[in-house]
Image (cartoon, rainbow, N blue to C red):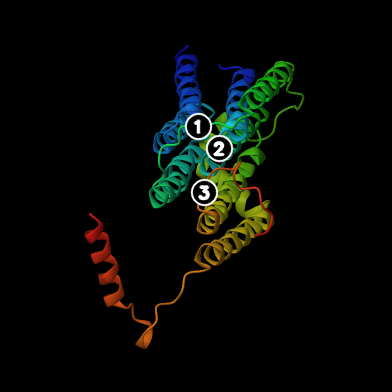
Amino acid sequence: MIPLEWYITLGFFLFSIGVIGVLIRRNIIMVLLSIELILNSANITFVAYSNFHQTITGQMMVFFILTMAAAEVALGLALVIALYRVKSTLNVDEINLLKW
Amino acid sequence: MTAQLLFFYFGGMAVAGAVVAVFTPNLVYSALSLLMTFIHIAGIYILLNAEFIAAVQIIVYAGAILVTYVFVLMLFNPEQEKRYFHKQYKIGAFLGAVVLFLMVFAGFKTEILSKGGPFTVEYVEEIGHTRAIGNALFTDFIFPFEIASFILLVAMFGAIILAGRGIKKPKGPGGRVDLSSRRKAKEAIVGER
């Protein structure tokens, strides 16, 4: 039997790695990939609590997070493509104009 | 004991894949090591008696989302940047470590307070996990389900409008692509070589 804390700690580790990735990487695609990592850690925590509470609501939440992740990928990558056409850079510290 | 060993394998590989993904300079390597992370997270779901979620994880995350990322990466053909971290990477790493410390500190103080619901492991095994999820999804969660489908529709429209903006329609009769200009461009490229 695996205790609940192990699953939660695994989720926390993945979350922190995702946060570090968002904060330190320059490439905007890598920032989006780190956000996927954060969403996955939330999924692990949801499923772990759902299993230990013997309900199924948490697993339903995983479905809606998956839907949101798919929408986020489509919109985010479309934004990246539109941005690359205008600025021809993918580094987040060079994208510093609100209007051009 | 076997379950714990499996947990260490899946969890360790997931964390290792995530670390490699965040710290390697090559973006394609990042995407592929994130694929390893996602597949091992599916193993974690199986350890948690959520087989259907594990299958969905592999199909949607590893199959669809990462393929989209790799596709866009190939589209940009990014050159290797010498400096792939921010200038403030030390602050970022410090903040991430603080978040991790606080959350682990809080996580080891969790307690399960509820009495437990109807979906015990035996019950789910009896009726099947897919069926249990389907029953809940189409009765109690039907409204969020519809909203999720609407979100996907809006995302599809938004992606098409955002990514397709600025592409000019080819001129010429019937909107046909002007082949002569494309040939000229190709000859120019060949001539440069």
Can residue A51 be seen in this snapshot? no
Q: CA separation, marks 2 and 1?
A: 8 Å
Image location of residue B163, percent across then percent down: 51, 62
**Marks 2 and 1 share the same chain:** no
Task: Identify residue type, mark 3.
Answer: Thr
Q: Secondary structure at mark 1?
A: loop
The residue at which mark 2 appears reads as A26
**Marks 3 and 1 share the same chain:** no
Q: Please give the chain letter of the residue carrying mark 1.
A: B
> Is B184 on the left-hand or right-hand side of B63?
left
Q: Is residue B147 above or below residue A51?
A: below
Q: Which mark is residue A89?
A: 3
Frontmost residue, A85 versus B41: A85
Q: Secondary structure at mark 3?
A: loop
Frontmost residue, A21 versus B141: A21
Return the residue found at the far front: B192
Image location of residue A27, percent across then percent down: 53, 40
Q: Please give the chain letter of the residue carrying mark 3.
A: A
Frontmost residue, B59 versus B122: B59
Task: Identify residue type, mark 1.
Answer: Arg
Q: Which mark is residue B83?
A: 1
Which residue shows up at 67% across the image and 21% down it?
B94
Mark nearest the camera among 2 and 3 is: 3
Q: Earlier in the sequence, mark 2 or mark 3?
A: 2
